[in-house]
Image (cartoon, rainbow, N blue to C red):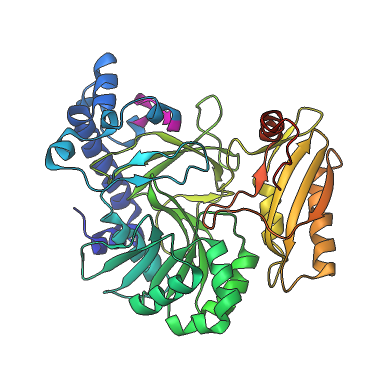
Amino acid sequence: MFSSQHLCRLFSGDITDYHRFIDELFSRRVADVFSDIPFYRDHLASKGLTPADFRGISDLSKLPVVDRRTLQSRPVETFVSAAALAAGLPSPAYTSGTSGEPLQLYASRDFYIASFHLMQLAYGGSVPFTASCLSEVDRVLPEQDDCQVHFIARSNSVAQLFERLKEIRPQVALLGPRRWRKLVERYGHELADLNLVVAGAAGAASTPEERAYLSGFVGCPVVDMYGATELGGAIFECPRGREHVLAHHNYLEILDDDGNPAAPGHSGNLVWTALDNSIMPLIRYQIGDTGQFAVDQECDCGWNGPIVQGVGGKAREKIVFPTGMTLNAFKLNVEVHRTPGPPLFDDYRFRQAEADLIRLSAVRSNDFSEDMLGDLLSRIEKLLGGHVRLELVWVDAIDQPMDKPVYFVSLEQSRREAAAGAGAPVTP
């Protein structure tokens, strides 16, 4: 295994060495899957391909794109290494299930160390270090390079989470933006006493305005980080505010709906290849999110890795206008989180209730401002372009998961719920 120090040198060193490393890692992964993982072994055999046909990452398109439906339609062993099965699988991980039925997954999480190493060094940290993030259960990864990652169970309350962070004393902490907001609401500037080098916000809509507000309480930069249970960490925000793919860990393609590479600056489907997971490597996995490669790939932060933007919207979460045009609903969430200062809402949810109506159900925060609300509603109405009406409804509470909040319900889902409920009240 490559050490996290070695990876840091690749990500901040010569770009030719970096690309050579990615090609080498991909070729090794193809050799593994050809001999050891039934789904990919069978596909390669059916196409008359061998590992010798894969000399670098540019040969990736010879393999099929898969998605969660592909995984759900087959036994999990179809995608698991035979060697890992023989040695005994670790405890499974599960996706949140917000995109449908949860997936059962297996992974070695050693490369979390490397991802957090890159992230905290970019913000002036040093080795050794400790990092914390959320997971299914409390657990600690084996120490590597004198560094350690502590997973904190998602079931912990906000108070329990704060106590665990004080106990662990990490240099890096990765939480959902909603968790950070709840911590700020309850503990305020006490969070600065954690002495974090950098805090990551992941798993839901977040904006520079919101992260700047949180940073004022946490006492360090709060930066965007994109990841998933299937992937681990995959993208991090550098000190220049640009989003770099952590390609030592997961290689990214962005494809249009026909499976062709989307041009830089054009949105497409995120398709990930896990380069380090030797237990259950997902190759060309279309995760269901959208984003785009930036046109300008130059960044003076000194870090290698492709630069992306607009990442986070679910491909299926679309507003459907009466004209037939569509708009990614993620843009509604971005507008809410663009409000400077404290959040307007304790919680909220958009629902396209009818073809020409979107209902915004919201819970007022303690810092609610009528002026800020007016600005927000104006921005949303401009985004909708007069195609759909916006209706605001104040509610006392919204039944919402903490780490994967549901901020938009599509017209299709609203109609399914209405049909299933046969006139029963629809949730906000």
Farthest residue in the left direction?
Answer: 87
Give percent across and percent down for residue 326: 72, 34
Find residue 298 and report its horizontal and vertical position in percent. 50, 55
135 falls in the magenta region: no
Direction from residue 125 to residue 35 in the image, left or right: left
User: In the image, which residues are magenta?
Assistant: 60-68
Residue 14 figure quarter: bottom left
Q: Is residue 345 above or below residue 330?
A: below
Question: Is residue 64 shown left or right of residue 26?
Answer: right
Q: Position of residue 293 (x, y in %)?
A: 53, 45
Relative depth, front residue between 416 and 70: 416
Q: Nearer the viewer, residue 234 or 14?
A: 234
Residue at 48% across / 42% down in the picture? 97
The residue located at (29%, 20%) in the rendering is 43
Q: In the image, residue 141 lies at what x, y percent?
A: 25, 61
Q: How many marks?
A: 0
Is 49 drawn above or below residue 416 in the view shown? Answer: above
The residue located at (65%, 66%) in the rendering is 209
Residue visible at 58% across and 79% down in the picture: 216
Asked whether residue 63 is drawn in magenta, I would say yes
Give the camera-side residue of 419 and 170: 419
- Residue 240 shows up from this direction: no
Q: Nearer the viewer, residue 15 or 88?
A: 88
The picture quadrant where one finds residue 253 is: top left
Q: Is residue 31 visible?
A: yes
Q: Left or right: where does residue 48 sit relative to residue 405?
A: left
